[in-house]
């Protein structure tokens, strides 16, 4: 999510010649894990490349197809029974954790075990780990105590920024894996413009120079994913131009930049992230009139499918920012927003309100679009395949 300090908001690689053999072996392992459900691989470090590996899906009902695209949230310290039921029946891709879900590491591990047990139910046709995620950016934006301690701004100002970014990624991976989490909604790749603006006020940007953000973001991503945790580059195509008060959590934000400025400045770090084989990209809820007037980026096919997929070549998993954000107030119900996002090309729908019912509404909207054909069954199934491949690699 974008407003990073509120209790429930979260703010919102290219060595192919050397890695082909490793990638092929990993791809085979992903398919075998997804289809066999081998228990020994449920928490193994991620080894597959960022590109989505093709998998053969088991038979799924429309509700299960839709559920595989939903990330749920809940309030309190214990996963509620309704969420566990959805997971047992193959109607969930994963769960996001916030500060009010965490009292201690022991308690969080117990919650993760309960979710894992539900995921391993015989009634769940998807035999792969859930996507269990949080915002562990560093500095002020951390859901867990511990690494990474430095903010992105502090890393950018360090005496050895590359080493600091690598240490932050390594530390975040160790910290999250210790409690059973496998996805970090980090790093932020926004290139901030002015001191004290939306990103800079909380130290959430490495630099005002795209090349620096690109290099340090890639260092963080590489270290994090080497440690077995999937990285999420955000907030595409970039929120660095947002002023101090422009917050998509609370209302619409329009960033009136030229297409050239977006591509030659804000998107530069994403080229590096894709080169570093980043597994996920979160798309912002800001409106970029030069790319698509009138629609937030995460609801705009020219941004998701045009800029990110076709122009930059990203083949991994896309994830929305929070579906309940104020920026989407004029776009109807939760179910309708989910359908619009999926139609634009978003794979995962992030429901961060803390109510399982929000995720169920998103599921219903996705199911409707899948059954009536509005979302296109081939595209829908391709999104689920990308998500299941990601799950199977973790």
Image (cartoon, helix red, strand yellow):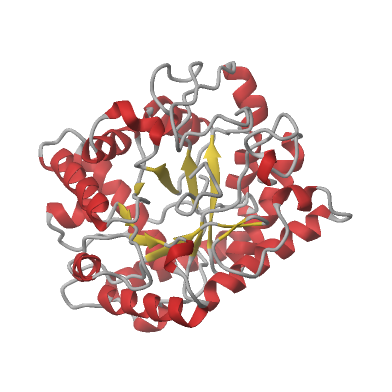
Q: Is residue 28 visible?
A: no
Residue 176 % position (x, y): 54, 70
Q: Residue at x 48, y 74 (%)?
A: 103
Where 235 falls versus 229 (above or below)?
above
Residue nearest the observer in this picture, 379 or 223: 223
Q: Residue at x 37, y 80 (%)?
A: 113
Direction right: furthest residue: 159
Residue nearest the observer in this picture, 215 or 55: 215
Residue 138 % position (x, y): 65, 58
Left or right: residue 324 compared with residue 109: left
Residue nearest the observer in this picture, 287 or 353: 353
What is the tally of numbered marks visible in this picture?
0
Q: Is residue 15 visible?
A: yes
Q: Which quadrant is the C terminus positioned in? A: bottom left
Quadrant in which residue 325 is drawn: top left
Residue 388 % position (x, y): 33, 60
Residue nearest the observer in this picture, 29 or 193: 193
Where 221 falls versus 372 (above or below)?
below
Left or right: residue 314 compared with residue 170: left
Residue 148 % position (x, y): 67, 63
Q: Residue at x 61, y 26 (%)?
A: 263
Left or right: residue 130 compared with residue 98: left
Q: Residue at x 40, y 81 (%)?
A: 110
Quadrant in which residue 64 is drawn: bottom left
């Amino acid at each position: 999510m974008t407003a990073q300090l509120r209790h429930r908001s979260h703010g919102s690689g290219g060595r192919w010649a050397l890695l082909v053999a490793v990638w092929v072996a990993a791809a085979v392992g992903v398919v075998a894990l997804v289809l066999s459900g081998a228990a020994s691989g449920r928490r193994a470090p991620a080894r597959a490349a960022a590109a989505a590996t093709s998998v053969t899906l088991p038979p799924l009902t429309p509700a299960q197809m839709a559920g595989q695209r939903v990330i749920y949230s809940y309030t309190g310290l214990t996963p509620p029974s309704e969420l566990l039921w959805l997971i047992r029946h193959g109607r969930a891709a994963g769960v996001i954790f916030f500060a009010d879900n965490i009292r201690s590491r022991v308690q969080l591990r117990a919650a993760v075990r309960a979710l894992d047990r539900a995921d391993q139910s015989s009634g769940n046709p998807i035999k792969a780990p859930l996507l269990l995620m949080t915002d562990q950016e560093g500095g002020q934006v951390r859901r867990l105590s511990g690494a990474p301690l430095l903010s992105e701004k502090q890393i950018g100002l360090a005496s050895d920024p590359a080493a600091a970014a690598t240490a932050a990624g390594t530390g975040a991976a160790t910290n999250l894996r210790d409690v059973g989490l496998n996805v970090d909604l980090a790093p932020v790749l926004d290139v901030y413009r002015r001191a004290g603006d939306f990103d800079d006020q909380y130290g959430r940007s490495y630099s005002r120079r795209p090349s620096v953000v690109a290099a340090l973001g890639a260092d963080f991503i590489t270290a994090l994913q080497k440690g077995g945790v999937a990285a999420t580059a955000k907030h595409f195509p970039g929120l660095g131009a947002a002023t101090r008060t422009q917050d998509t959590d609370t209302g619409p934000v329009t960033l009136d930049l030229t297409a050239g400025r977006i591509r030659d400045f804000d998107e530069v770090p994403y080229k590096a992230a894709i080169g570093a084989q980043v597994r996920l990209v979160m798309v912002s809820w800001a409106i970029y009139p030069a790319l698509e007037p009138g629609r937030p980026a995460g609801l705009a096919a020219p941004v998701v499918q045009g800029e990110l997929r076709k122009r930059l070549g990203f083949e991994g998993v896309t994830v929305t920012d929070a579906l309940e954000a104020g920026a989407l107030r004029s776009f109807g119900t939760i179910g309708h927003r989910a359908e619009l996002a999926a139609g634009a090309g978003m794979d995962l729908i992030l429901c961060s309100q803390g109510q399982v019912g929000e995720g169920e509404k998103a599921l219903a909207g996705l199911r409707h679009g899948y059954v009536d054909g509005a979302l296109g069954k081939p595209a829908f199934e391709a999104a689920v395949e990308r998500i299941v491949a990601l799950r199977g690699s973790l």
